[in-house]
Amino acid sequence: MAKGSEQVTAWPALLMAGMEPRGAGQAQGGCSSLPRTTEEPPAAAGLRARLALPPDPTLLLLLLLLPACCAQKQPLRAEDIPCQAMAAQPAEGQKPQKPFHIVTPVLESLSLSKAAGTKVFMKMENVQPSGSFKIRGIGHLCQAAARKGCRHFVCSSGGNAGLAAALAARELAVPITVVVPSSSGPTAVHKLQELGATVEVYGKVWDDANSRAQELAKTEGWVIIPPFDHPLVWEGHASLVRELKDSLEDKPGAIVVAVGGGGLLAGVVAGLQQVGWQDVPVIAAETLGAHSFHEALKAGRLVTLPDITSVATCLGAKTVAARALECARECQVISQVVRDEEAVRAVQQFLDEERALVEPACGAPLAVLYSGRLQRLQSEGRLPSPLRPVLLVVCGGSNIHTGRLRALQSQLGLH
C-alpha cells in the first residue's frame, strides 16, 4: 500500500505539467463527463513512459480524470469513477484484497420463532467489526476508491456508516472526516474518534450532515463515501445473501430487514437476484417518523419527509434512495411501519432473550416479528401459509448502550 501511494502522490503535479488543460465547457461537467475510452492520448503515453508504468486501461482512465478534478478543485467523487473501473481486479501476481467484513453466523431463535409462528433464523450482523452490516458495502467501496489513488475520504453518517468508513480508512491508511448530525450523540462521536476519524457535528439530522459532507468534498477535493446510495455499496451488501445461500438448507420464506436510506434493501435484492432467490419476499421495516420508504411506496415516487421525529436516528433519511423504490418494482417488498415504543420494547426483549443489545433501528424488524405482524400478513394473503423459515437480518448498530436504552424507555414512557 505504501509503495503504491508514493507512486500516486506524483501524479497530480506531473499531470498538470504534462497535459493540456481541458476546455471550460468540459471542465464544468466534472469527472463524470469524461469519455470512457481505453485509447491512450500522446500526453498520457509520455507521462506513462516517465513514470515507467504499464499501459493499464484503468490507469489511463484515472490519468484523464485527475487533471480536470485538480484544475477545478472538484472532488474526485466515488460516483465519478465508473464502477467497472473501481471494481477492477488486482494486477497479475498481486493478491486480491481481503474484505473488511466477516462471515457472520446464522442462528435459530426459539423465542422469535414462537412469536412469529414459524421458524426464524437470525443473520447476526451485529458482530461485524464495525458493529453493523455497513462494513460490507462501505468497506467494499472504500477499497475500490483507495485502489484508484483516493487520498482523503469524507462521509456523512448517523453513526454506523461513519464507523464502517472510519474502520476501512484506518485499514487503508487513508485520512477520513466524518460529518454526523447532533442527533447521533456523544457515543458515536467518541467511537469515530477512537478509530482515528476527524469528526464534525453539523445540523440536526443526517440530511444536514450530508449537505456539509458534500460541501467539504467540493471545497477540499476529498472523495465522498455515500452511506447507502452507491452501486458498490449495494454490491458489498449483496455478500450477505450469498452467505445465506451457503448456510441455509433452502431459501427462506421471507427476509426481514430494516430500511433507512435503502442501502441494505438494495443489497439484499441484488443478492437475491444473484443467487436465484428473487421470488423471496422482503419485509422492509421502518419506524414512524423515519418512514420515507413507506411514503415513497404509497406515492409511487420519492417522497421527502418534513423532518425525522423517530428515536431510531440511524433510519433517519428524509428521502430514501431511488434504487430502493426500484427494488420494490423488481421483487415483492412489503413495507411495515412500527411505532418507536414497539421498536424500543423489541430491543429490550431481544436483549433479555438473545443476550444481544441492538439499536432501535434494528428494533423495527424485531418488532415486526414480536408483534404478530407476520401472521397478519399471512391472513391478508400477502405471505403464504404455512410459511417457510424466515430470515431476520440483525443489522446491529453501535450507537447504543444500557444507559441509552434506559433513557429511551424513560423518554417514551415505557417504565
Image: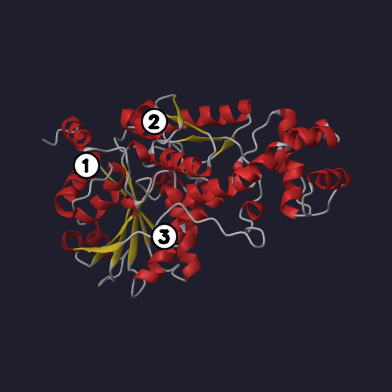
Residue 29 % position (x, y): 73, 36
From the image, tell me which residue sits under label 1: 344
Against 118, is 363 above or below?
above
Tell me the SS state at disc 2: loop
Q: Residue 92 is drawn in which quadrant?
A: bottom right
**Amino acid under disc 3:** Leu
Quarter holding residue 106? bottom left
Q: Quadrant of residue 162?
A: top left
Distance from disc 3 to disc 2, alpha carbons, whole Å, reads 31 Å
Place of residue 46 in the rendered image (x, y in percent of width and height, measured from the top left): 86, 44
User: Height in image: 199 above or below 254?
Assistant: above
Residue 307 is labelled as: 2
Element type where label 3 sits in the image? helix
Which labelled disc corresponds to residue 240?
3
- In depth, the one of 73 and 215 nearer the eye is 73
| Mark 2 closeness class: few <14, some 14–19, many ≥20 residues within 10 Å | some
Q: CA distance from mark 3 to mark 1?
A: 25 Å
Q: Count of labels shown? A: 3
Point out the tag, 2 or 1, that comes first from the N-terminus: 2
Q: Earlier in the sequence, mark 3 or mark 2?
A: 3
Most distant residue in the front direction: 3
Please identify the quadrant where the C terminus is shown. top left
Q: Is residue 299 above or below residue 214?
A: below
Secondary structure of the residue carrying numbered label 1: helix
Q: Is residue 281 visible?
A: yes
Which residue lies at the image location 34% right of the left edge and 69% below the top edge?
A: 252
